[in-house]
């Protein structure tokens, strides 16, 4: 059997995603009309012999309760939310729930960051992992040399794919091959994490026994039970024939900022062409709006047949779109009203916003009212604002 664990973080994480994470936890923010975490969950469904999916985080349980029960029913697969009492780091969180994760005696455990957008080639990774025969295999991708330092940079053996060297967000360039935040492990990963705790205890004991200053400073800043997978496990185990890499040639992005959610929504809409074409809107311009390119329209949304939608638009529940409206490259969140002839591009329109007739919007926001004939361009508009003058390149607080 196989189990999958998705790390969803908590409210103190994902602060760069504000203001979009004020209303709902970042992992539930919709991309291509589906909660962010829905995409890795659906990818897990393709793993042979998958017994369970666990979401580990430190958000309140009630925030995930509704989603977890509806997705379990839909996929006919148990999906459980496990709440950490406090942040323990990516490896610490996994270790904390080791007894529950091992209940099904899995031979393999997938571990996925929830804030990455990719095609999650999990069955192919599992096959490669079994061929390599190590403790873990990590999904990796080549990115531009300029952007590599935002990620874990690594060196892999070109023939055996063994992970030879790993540095998390290095200051000087190591490699443009980076860690995608998607792994498969054997249960030996728990022993590896255990070793980190044992080593730390050893250092702490030594410190108590001696007044040796360097030992003191080495251990002073480490919270005893916070273990990061990248720095505490991947770096020390590189080059020891335990960790291997699997390179993806598909798309991959990290979702840390609101702007990235537009890009990732677009990537997932494009993927729906192959994986779930039934989720893409197909308008004919007579009974339903004209749709060009990829778009998702929630069944409860009311879109006027004379509206033009797309490409790369996703429209959430209870949205009303008036006559002559033109939408492209945008995410329209729940309960938004867009009045006649409004034009929206490259924007996220926040929950319960209202856009007036002939308004022109290129902004992010929530519960924002744009009055008729107002132009908003390149702005971030914060919640509960009424805009009655045109604005450009501003952050409206
Ligand atoms: N449950 C839980 N508890 N989840 C956590 C915790 C924690 O204490 N800390 C982080 N996470 C989750 C985050 O929500 C995210 O999904 C994932 O674990 C990794 O978060 P970070 O540890 O903050 O690392 P990062 O996102 O800056 O970078 C990692 O991912 C990159 C790929 O997106 C590193 O592994 C990089 O090397 C990698 O390139």
Image: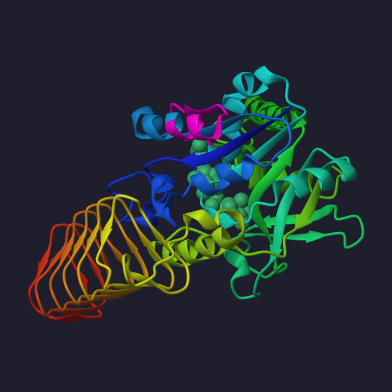
Q: In this view, does 103 lie to the left or right of 66?
A: right
**Is residue 221 at all visible to an observer of this figure?**
no
Seen from the viewer's position, the closer of residues 143 and 81 is: 81
Percent of width and height locating residue 172: 65, 69
Residue shown at the point (47%, 41%) measured from the top left: 9
Residue shown at the point (47%, 28%) measured from the top left: 84
Q: In this view, does 300 lie to the left or right of 253?
A: left
Q: Does the magenta stretch include residue 83?
A: yes
List the single residue furthest toward the right.
159
Tell me which corner region of the image, top left, top right, bottom left or bottom right, holds residue 168: bottom right
Q: Is residue 66 above or below residue 324?
A: above
Percent of width and height locating residue 214: 63, 42
Q: In this view, does 391 lie to the left or right of 327?
A: left
Percent of width and height locating residue 243: 80, 45
Seen from the viewer's position, the closer of residues 205 and 175 is: 175
Percent of width and height locating residue 58: 43, 34
- Give the position of the N terminus as an image quadrant: top right
Q: Is residue 374 magenta?
A: no
**Is residue 72 at all visible to an observer of this figure?**
yes
Q: Is residue 184 left or right of residue 146?
A: right
- Give the position of the C terminus as an image quadrant: bottom left
Tell me which corner region of the image, top left, top right, bottom left or bottom right, holds residue 349: bottom left
Q: How many marks?
A: 0
Part of the protein shown in magenta: 70-88
């Amino acid at each position: 059997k196989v189990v999958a664990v998705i790390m969803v973080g908590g409210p103190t994480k994902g602060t760069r995603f504000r203001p979009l994470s004020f209303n709902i936890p970042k992992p539930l923010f919709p991309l291509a009309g589906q909660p962010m975490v829905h995409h890795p969950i659906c990818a897990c469904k393709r793993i042979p012999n998958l017994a369970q999916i666990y979401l580990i985080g430190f958000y309140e349980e009630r925030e995930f309760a509704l989603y977890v029960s509806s997705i379990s029913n839909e996929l006919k697969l148990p999906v459980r939310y496990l709440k950490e009492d406090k942040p323990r780091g990516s490896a610490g969180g996994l270790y904390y729930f080791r007894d529950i994760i091992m209940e099904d005696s899995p031979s393999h455990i997938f571990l996925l960051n929830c804030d990455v957008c990719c095609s999650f080639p999990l069955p192919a990774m599992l096959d490669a992992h079994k061929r390599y025969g190590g403790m873990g295999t990590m999904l990796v991708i080549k990115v531009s040399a300029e952007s590599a330092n935002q990620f874990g940079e690594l060196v892999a053996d070109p023939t055996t794919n063994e992970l030879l060297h790993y540095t998390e967000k290095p200051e000087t360039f190591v490699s443009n091959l980076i860690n995608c935040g998607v792994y498969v492990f054997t249960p030996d990963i728990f022993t590896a994490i255990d070793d980190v705790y044992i080593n730390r205890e050893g250092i702490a004991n030594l410190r108590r026994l001696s007044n040796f200053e360097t030992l003191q400073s080495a251990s002073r800043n480490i919270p005893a039970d916070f273990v990061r997978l990248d720095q505490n496990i991947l770096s020390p185990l590189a080059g020891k024939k335990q960790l291997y890499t699997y390179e993806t040639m598909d798309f991959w992005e990290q979702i840390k900022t609101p702007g990235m959610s537009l890009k990732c929504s677009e990537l997932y809409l494009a993927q729906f062409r192959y994986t779930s074409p039934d989720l893409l809107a197909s308008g004919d311009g007579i009974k339903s709006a004209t749709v060009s390119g990829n778009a998702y329209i929630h069944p409860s949304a009311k879109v006027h047949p004379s509206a033009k939608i797309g490409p790369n638009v996703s429209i959430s529940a209870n949205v009303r779109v008036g006559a002559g409206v033109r939408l492209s490259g945008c995410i329209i969140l729940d309960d938004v009203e867009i009045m006649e002839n409004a034009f929206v591009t490259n924007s996220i329109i926040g929950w319960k916003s209202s856009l007036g007739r002939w308004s022109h919007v290129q902004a992010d926001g929530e519960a924002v009212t744009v009055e008729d004939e107002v132009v908003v361009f390149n702005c971030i508009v914060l919640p509960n604002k009424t805009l009655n003058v045109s604005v450009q390149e501003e952050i409206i607080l």
